[in-house]
Each structure stands twice: as C-alpha cells, then as structure tokens.
Image (cartoon, coloured by chain):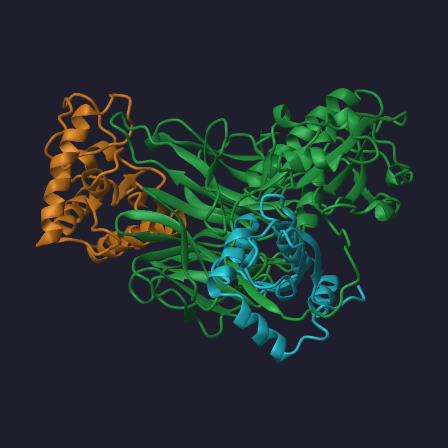
Chain colours: A green, B cyan, C orange
C-alpha cells in the first residue's frame, strides 16, 4: 500500500465539473518526506572524503545509445471506490503514452519481481535494478466521497534510489483518461525537462468511400486515438485542413460554400460555425496566429493565389503577398513576427520566410524537389515541411534559415506535418498508391524529430490532415 | 556539494594521467559507458549540452560516486532541460550494466577519480 | 511535342476508363466522339456540351497553359455555349495527386482561370463564368500512374 501523508486536494474549490470540460487539478505531493531516504547504495555511497587526485584522467563520452529508457509502470493501488479498475486502467494508459513516445520502454508485468501492492512506502530498488528498470511509477487511485476521482502517483529514480516526482490529481471520474495523460505529461516533464504532449487532442479529416467520391468529415480524438467524435453534422462532402487555435477552443478549416473553397471557423464547445471573411474568390489554407487573434490564409482569384491576414476582432484584412504567383500554406513563427509560406515565384514551389507584415520575403529551401506545407515548430527552432523528390513524398525539418535539413519520412505520399505542442513529435498523413481495385488507404503517422519512432496512429476510418492541439489547460 | 574534485587539478596532473593511461585504455572506458547512455537525439535538438562528471571508482573499477562539476550543477538549477540531460549521464554511470569500468594498468592513484565529459557531439 | 503526346495518351486512356466506369457515375465525360444519345430524348446543355465539344481540357504536370488540343476543345465549347444563352458556366479546375492539398487547390484555380480567360477571348461573356477548384479532391480517374494523373489534371466546363 502506498500510504504517504498527502495534502488535501484543492479540487472542490474549482466548482462543479462540466460534462465536456472536466476540471482537473494537479498539485505536488510532499516530496520532502523522502529526502532523508535518498540513495544508500549505488547512488552516492561515499567511500572516503575526497582528497585531490594525483592525476586527472580525462575521458570524453561522445557517443550515446538512443535506446528508450526502461521504466516500470505499476498498477496504481486502490484508494477509494472503483480503485482497482481505475488504478489498472490509468497505469495502462500511462504506460501506453510513454511507450508511444519512443523515449520509454515499459517493462511488462511478467518481469516484475516486486509486486505493486508490496511496494509500500518505497520500492525495493535492487528488485528493479535486477530487471534493468531505470525508473518506476507507482500510484493510487479511487473515487472519493465527493464523487471525484483522486489519483496520486510517484516517479522513482531506481539508480538514484529516490522519489523524483509526485503529484495528486483529481477530476470527475469521466475524465480518468485525461488524468492518466496528465500523469504521463508530468513524468515526461520530470525526465526530459520539457513540457509533455499527452494531454492533447488531434483534429483531423476522417475519410470514407471510394477515392473519386470521398466523404471527408471533421473529427477529433485524444492524442492516443481514444474518444473519437465527429465535430459537425455531415452537411458538406469535403472538409479539409482543420487547425487549432493556440488559445481558444476554435478550429479553422476549409470547406465548400456555393461550390467554392472557403475558410470556416467553428467552436468545439458550441459547435457553431461561421464563414470567415467576405471574399469574392476562393479562400483556403487557414492558420491561426500564435495569439489566436488573427487567421492567415490564401485567396485565389484570377489565376493568382496570395496570402491575407484577417483580424478576427475587427474583421479587417491585410494583403501580405503580391503578384501572379501561388503563395499558400502560411504558418506563423511562435513569436508571431514572421511567416513561413510556400510559393512558386521562383519556378518550382519552395519555402519562403517573410515578416508578419509581408516584408522581405526570403527563400529558405534550396534542396532538390518541390517543397510545400511549411509549419513552424511551437519551439521556434525548426520548420517542418513536405518535400516531393524523385517520385516520392517525404516530411522533413529544417532550421528557419534553411540550414540543417533532415528528412524524417518518405513514401508514395507523405504530407501535411503538424507539431506536438512541445515540438518533439510530428504527425502527418500517409497515402498509399491506388491498388488494382482503385482503393487507396490514408493513415495518420507520427515520428520523433530525431527521425526515430515512426509509427501509425490508428484511426477507425481512413484519416488525413491531422492538427495537434496545444496542451489542454 | 562542497567537494570539488576539479578544484586542485593542475596541468601536471593531466599530463601525469596522459602518460600513465593509454589511449586504448581510455577508449575502453568510454566504450564501456556509452552503451548505457540512453539519450534521445530529439532531446538534443538545438542544444550544445555537455556535462563534466567526476566518478569515484574502486580498485575493481566500480563507480561509487558521481560529482557534477560545480558550474554544470549551477546550470542544472537554472535549466530543467539541462538538468534532464545531466541525469541521463548520471544514469549511465550508475547503470549496473556499465558501472564497473575496465581498469587501466596504471597505479590506482592515477584513475581513482575519472573525469568524464559527456558531450553527445556524435549524436547531434 | 511532349505535351501533345501526353494529351494523346490521355485521350486514349480516357476512353478506356469510360468503358469500364459504372453506369451510376454522374460525371459526364468524353471527347465528342463517343457519346451516342438517342435523338428523341431531350439532352441537357451539359450533355450537349460533352457530346459535341467535350466538357474538359487537360494540362501538363504543374502547368496551366492551354495546349493546342485544349484550345480546340474550348473553341467547340464556346460554340455550344452560344446555343444556351441562359446557362451559367462553372469552370472546375482539378489537379493530380502528385502535389499537396493546398498547392493543388491554387493550381486548380489557375487552370480554371486559364480556361475562363480563353473563353472570354472567344466572346463568351466573362460575367457568366465562375471558376472554382477541387485541387486533388475529386479525381476523374482512380489510379496512381501517369495515365490516371494525366486525366485528372483537368478543367471541366459545367453548364447549369
């Protein structure tokens, strides 16, 4: 049993949970308790007071082993009603999150020497070292008298022999998966020093039907594929390129109005949708500014496609690019000062960066092939893009000055990267070539920015155009 | 941490170690430790992180203590991402699979503290 | 030279595709030589256009210039359109699957616009013509090969 004195949660102070957006509270548990217990063997066994060395043997370690970290995520022990079920389910979601990230390798329960209910106040570290676990996650879960699900967890450093993270979370039981994702995010943050990406959603296009009469619906799901739902009644047959607002629960996307592409905005909570901007031509390729107050998009009219910015408050529009080119797929830098976009002004489509006011457009992609769909990383350090080269499509990244290009994926058609909010993972869609019977599969894929851990993101129907949400507050 | 193994290091000490321990012996130690350094290349994106660790080892080569260079330790307190990086190096040093290093033939006094620099320049 | 060859291949494969397409497909296709409608039935303007002029023109990869064949088709279309002065004209631009969605929407608009400009030169009132683009979203022919792609890089004239 995990019995540590924990402070009361402040959850009840946050008001009644709503069915759509449950409140979820997180607070640190008392880590001080364990300070005195830290490290008795391998971690810091002090042999003797150190006197100056006679010689200084200097060695550089320049290589590393990009293996995921072995971690044991134990079932959370019951601490309240339904504790058994929630404890096990939450641990499973956490383990799956960590595994999917490519940074962790959960050790399966068959290998555990010490069992979860025997861990108690602190783990028997030697048992975990013996199976090569570098970290250990323990916890407790259960529904309390106030009807809220309370979950506590600890992250243990097996070599250092100490608890390095511990929190209590509480929310309506229907939000149990969100609690699990928050636990994953806290573990990720403690281990990497960066924000996680687990308590997030993906909005995308769910596709069904034959290739030449494809039905495309706006859908949303949790980052791990759970809780899939369709966002709007199926009133139109083509919806494309949804994108999250970085600050509100709004999504902008493209659909057809009077047979022409137009940019829409819809609210996730109210379901209200609205045509954006009073444009006579086609409008498409929308994307929010980092402050959520503007949408930048393409307008096509008279054979030229240019980039406009629309202020959502004043509805004032500003033309940012000029000329007879195709300028499309604009994306803001996270500081809002620059925009990267796709243009054929130099011949084949390439990537350009300009000021957010349209000043000084400068080409940044110079590799072979055709570059498109640039998306600025939320961290600001990279731009992801689609590249078409030698009959294949791939997704890659480069620095905003165009240096350091790396291709992360390649296939018949890889397109449309989107960033996890921490800038560590890229999701995109992969379409297979048409088979003999005219069937063509389209799936969501994810890959780490190192190029490792390329894997499919399962969806019930075919899927395309993923867009990753910010971390849910 | 008041102990600072680096405090009294002199050029002559470095030269003494250089003379006593061969390049092959150094390579054997680094080659023994790096497989336990689990580092995600994505985590290194846009960084030039490196960390200096002083490892106290027994005569058998078993790591008993790791001390982070005071300058690097100060940076850990400022930068969570850097702290995480240092922790990956520390885990490598204490991983049971790698924490007994191949000992050099030189007298123990020459290598009872190993001054390692973890610098993943071959990973980036 | 190369462009012409492609167009010829396109026409040939189009016929093949038509023959194998299920009857329920509503998209009217043709080059003006294949469709045979019984004269007793009243044909819609769109059917007349498809039968007598061909309702679509084709483009080279990432291009919007009108080939000589395309111009000939559009001249025939303009003649047919002259017989239906009430009909509104929608030009739909399309692209093959070898480009990204957003770029292809722009490319389709360019193609539709090239057709509109040419028709205006032929005397079709520009005010009657609207243009749109479906990018790569509505391929006429399903297939991941050059023959299919050549068919899908098209602008279709729709009379309403």
Identify the residue at horizontal 63%, vertical 44% (top origin): B96
Identify the residue at horizontal 79%, vertical 23% (top origin): A83
Q: Residue A465 placed where, x, y %?
A: 47, 42
Q: In terms of depth relative to the viewer, which is nearer, A167 or C117?
A: A167
Q: Is residue A223 visible?
A: no
Q: Is residue A309 visible?
A: yes
Q: Residue B75 placed where, x, y %?
A: 70, 66
The answer to whether residue B16 is above or below residue B36 is below
Q: Residue A331 placed where, x, y %?
A: 51, 58
Identify the residue at horizontal 18%, vertical 48% (top origin): C74
For the C terminus of chain C, the image quarter is: top left
Residue B94 in the figure: left or right of residue C44: right
Residue B44 position by quadrant? bottom right
Residue A129 position by quadrant? top right
Number of numbered discs present? Answer: 0
Residue A281 position by quadrant? bottom left
Residue B101 in the figure: left or right of residue A137: left
The answer to whether residue A465 is above or below residue A324 is above
Q: Residue A443 placed where, x, y %?
A: 43, 35
């Amino acid at each position: 049993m995990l019995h540590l004195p924990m402070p009361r949660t402040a959850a009840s102070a946050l008001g009644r949970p709503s069915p759509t957006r449950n409140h979820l509270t997180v607070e640190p548990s008392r880590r001080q308790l364990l300070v005195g217990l830290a490290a008795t063997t391998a971690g810091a066994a002090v042999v003797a007071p150190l006197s100056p060395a006679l010689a200084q043997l200097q060695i550089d370690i320049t290589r590393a082993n990009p293996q995921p970290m072995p971690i044991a995520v134990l079932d959370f022990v019951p601490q309240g009603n339904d504790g058994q079920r929630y404890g096990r389910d939450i641990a499973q979601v956490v383990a799956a999150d960590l595994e999917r990230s490519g940074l962790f390798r959960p050790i399966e329960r068959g290998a555990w020497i010490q069992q979860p209910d025997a861990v108690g106040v602190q783990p028997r570290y030697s048992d975990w070292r013996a199976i090569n676990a570098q970290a250990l996650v323990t916890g407790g879960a259960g529904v309390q008298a106030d009807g809220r699900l309370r979950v506590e967890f600890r992250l243990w450093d097996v070599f250092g022999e100490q608890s390095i993270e511990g929190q209590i979370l509480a929310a309506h039981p229907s939000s149990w998966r969100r609690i699990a994702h928050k636990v994953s995010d806290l573990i990720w943050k403690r281990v990497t020093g960066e924000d996680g990406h687990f308590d997030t959603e993906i909005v995308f296009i769910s596709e069904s039907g034959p290739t030449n009469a494809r039905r495309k619906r706006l859908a949303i799901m949790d980052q791990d594929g759970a809780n899939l739902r369709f966002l709007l009644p199926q009133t139109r047959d083509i919806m494309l390129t949804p994108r999250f607002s970085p600050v509100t629960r709004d999504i902008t996307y493209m659909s057809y109005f009077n047979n022409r592409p137009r940019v829409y905005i819809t609210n996730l909570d109210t379901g209200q949708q609205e045509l954006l901007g009073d444009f006579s031509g086609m409008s498409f390729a929308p994307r929010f500014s980092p402050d959520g107050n503007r949408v930048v998009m393409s307008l096509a009219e008279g054979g030229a496609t240019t980039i406009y910015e629309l202020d959502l408050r004043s509805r004032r529009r500003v033309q940012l690019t000029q000329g007879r080119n195709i300028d499309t797929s604009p994306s803001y830098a996270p500081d809002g000062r620059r925009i990267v976009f796709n243009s054929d002004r130099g011949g084949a489509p390439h990537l350009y960066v300009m000021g957010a006011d349209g000043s000084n457009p400068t080409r940044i992609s110079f590799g072979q092939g055709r570059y498109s769909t640039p998306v600025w990383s939320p961290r600001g350090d990279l731009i992801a893009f689609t590249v078409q080269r030698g009959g294949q499509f791939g997704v890659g990244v480069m620095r905003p000055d165009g240096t350091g290009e790396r291709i992360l994926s390649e296939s018949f058609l890889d397109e449309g990267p989107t960033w996890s909010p921490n800038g560590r993972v890229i999701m995109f869609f992969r379409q297979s070539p048409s088979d003999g019977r005219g069937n063509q599969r389209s799936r969501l894929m994810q890959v780490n920015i190192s190029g490792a851990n390329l894997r499919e993101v399962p969806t019930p129907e075919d899927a395309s155009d993923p867009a990753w949400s910010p971390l849910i507050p | 941490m008041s102990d600072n193994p680096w405090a009294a290091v002199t050029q002559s000490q470095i030269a003494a170690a250089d003379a006593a321990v061969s390049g092959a012996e150094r390579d054997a130690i680094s080659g023994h430790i790096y497989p336990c350094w689990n580092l995600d290349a994505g985590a290194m994106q846009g960084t030039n992180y490196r960390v200096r660790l002083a490892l106290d080892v027994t005569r058998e080569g078993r790591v008993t203590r790791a001390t982070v260079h005071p300058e690097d330790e100060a940076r850990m307190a400022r930068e969570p991402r850097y702290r995480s990086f240092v922790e990956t190096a520390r885990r490598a040093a204490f991983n049971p699979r790698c924490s007994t290093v191949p000992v050099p033939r030189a007298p123990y006094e020459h290598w009872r503290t190993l001054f390692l620099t973890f610098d993943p320049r071959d990973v980036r | 030279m190369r462009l012409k060859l492609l167009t010829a291949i396109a026409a040939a494969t189009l016929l093949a595709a038509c023959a194998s397409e299920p009857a329920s497909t509503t998209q009217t296709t043709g080059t003006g030589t294949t469709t045979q409608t019984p004269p007793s039935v009243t044909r819609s303007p769109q059917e007349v256009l498809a039968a007598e002029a061909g309702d679509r023109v084709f483009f080279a990869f990432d291009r919007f210039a009108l080939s000589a064949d395309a111009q000939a088709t559009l001249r025939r279309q303009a003649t047919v359109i002259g017989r239906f002065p009430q009909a509104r004209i929608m030009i739909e631009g399309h692209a093959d699957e070898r480009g990204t969605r957003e770029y292809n929407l722009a490319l389709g608009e360019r193609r539709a616009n090239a057709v509109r400009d040419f028709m205006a030169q032929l005397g079709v009132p520009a005010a009657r013509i609207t243009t749109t683009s479906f990018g790569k979203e509505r391929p006429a022919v399903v297939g991941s090969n050059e023959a299919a792609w050549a068919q899908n890089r098209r602008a279709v004239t729709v009379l309403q």
